[in-house]
Image (cartoon, helix red, strand yellow):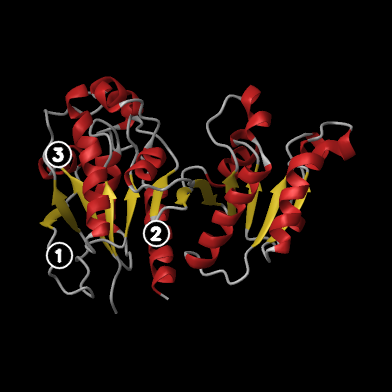
């Protein structure tokens, strides 16, 4: 059987990215995860953590049905720009972190990889170390710009839930103005298309939250549901997309509501994600929808204080790899 080949970018070298990537060598994954990292850094962390990992240089010419043996880890070596010490950021390595992403994306475009999984990076290092790049707001926006993708959607999955967002990292005071009928429609279309094409759901069922308490209570607690969200849902339904709502956000996550749903579309970050993270923190995965390739990520940050200590949990990375594997298999159908 042909195994998907996934590029795993190791992220900020001073953080836990290298630590958790080493654990890929010990999990029975039905794919070939290839870690993009400085090989010497991986060797150093393996020694610090007492992990007996055999690092194997990535060979794109290997038969696609061959998996590494247990304890082996395929590595695409990308050298650090400067020495790295666990837990201590070095601005000189900002370009290295972006090179990991660029190499993964180029590998996907060239047919080497079937998708990418990203370990956490540190935005401050990139913004301070590469001011000429302009403001760096994160993996998602960077990959969208590099792939000339006009719109992407953030979806987190875990604990039996999938939650996508209409707006993401906005101050709460700006959320209502940002939610427009065209935006709700376009986000829902991307969510529907990727649930169908990358998750293998023939007819995705999407529950949509309101913006206001009690979904506006018929206009008594706000008009966004009546003026924006309901017209968007009616238009989407006319296109054959199964969207339902708007539902109050404080009840939509009840099991009796979710039993017939494939995803929830929430209006803003802290409306949808607290419930999901309560159900799955440390085992969740961040999926970027709308890109012309597969990209998943861990649901946590660089955890500088845990780097090199052996206390980092690799559970989210394993789920991110398994999710990318599922998406790659469905995309091949």
The mark lying in front, picked from 1 and 3, is 1
Q: In x, y percent, where is residue 54? A: 13, 55
Nearer-N-terminus badge (3/2): 3
Residue 167 appears in which quarter of the rendering? top right
Alpha carbon of mark 3 to alpha carbon of mark 2: how far? 25 Å
**Residue marked by disc 3:** 41
Alpha carbon of mark 1 to alpha carbon of mark 3: how far? 22 Å
Task: Give the vertical position of 200 relative to 321 (above or below).
Answer: below
Residue 235 appears in which quarter of the rendering? bottom right
Front position in the image: 180 or 135: 180
Residue 181 in the figure: left or right of residue 110: right
Contact check, label 3 and label 2, Cβ < 8 Å: no
Query: At x 26% / y 61%, what residue is drawn?
Result: 113
Query: At x 39% / y 59%, what residue is drawn?
Result: 324
Residue 324: which numbered mark, if any? 2
Alpha carbon of mark 1 to alpha carbon of mark 2: how far? 19 Å
**Residue marked by disc 1:** 60
Front position in the image: 204 or 118: 204
Residue 105 in the figure: left or right of residue 46: right
Nearer-N-terminus badge (1/3): 3
Q: In x, y percent, where is residue 134? A: 32, 25
Question: Would you call the spot at circle 1 few (<14 residues within 10 Å), some (14-19), or many (20 or more)?
Answer: few
Q: In x, y percent, where is residue 264? A: 65, 51
Q: In x, y percent, where is residue 225? A: 78, 41
Determine if residue 252 is in view.
no
């Amino acid at each position: 059987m042909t195994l998907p080949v996934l590029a795993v970018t190791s992220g900020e070298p001073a953080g836990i990215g290298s630590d958790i990537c080493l654990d890929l060598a010990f999990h029975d994954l039905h794919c070939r995860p290839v870690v993009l990292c400085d090989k010497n850094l991986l060797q150093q962390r393996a020694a610090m953590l007492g992990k007996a990992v055999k690092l194997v240089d990535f060979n794109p010419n290997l038969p696609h049905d061959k998996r590494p043996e247990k304890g082996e880890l395929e590595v695409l070596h990308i050298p650090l720009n400067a020495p790295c010490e666990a837990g201590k950021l070095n601005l000189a390595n900002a370009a290295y972190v972006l090179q990991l992403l660029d190499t993964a994306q180029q590998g996907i475009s060239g047919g080497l990889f079937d998708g990418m999984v990203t370990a956490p990076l540190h935005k401050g290092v990139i913004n301070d170390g590469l001011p000429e790049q302009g403001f760096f707001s994160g993996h998602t926006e960077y990959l969208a710009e590099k792939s000339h993708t006009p719109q992407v959607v953030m979806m987190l999955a875990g604990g039996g839930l999938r939650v996508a967002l209409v707006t993401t990292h906005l101050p709460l005071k700006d959320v209502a103005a940002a939610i427009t009928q065209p935006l709700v429609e376009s986000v829902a279309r991307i969510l529907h298309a990727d649930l169908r094409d990358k998750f293998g759901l023939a007819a995705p069922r999407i529950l949509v939250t309101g913006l206001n308490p009690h979904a506006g209570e018929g206009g008594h607690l706000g008009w966004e549901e009546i003026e924006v969200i309901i017209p968007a849902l009616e238009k989407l339904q006319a296109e054959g997309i199964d969207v339902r709502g708007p539902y109050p956000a404080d009840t939509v996550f009840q099991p009796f509501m979710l039993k017939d749903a494939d995803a929830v579309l929430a209006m803003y970050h802290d409306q949808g994600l607290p419930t999901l993270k309560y159900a799955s923190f440390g085992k969740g995965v961040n999926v970027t929808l709308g890109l012309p390739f597969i990209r998943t990520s861990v649901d946590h940050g660089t955890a500088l204080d845990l780097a090199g200590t052996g206390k980092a949990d690799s559970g989210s990375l394993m789920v991110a790899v398994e999710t990318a594997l599922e998406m790659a298999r469905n995309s091949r159908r």
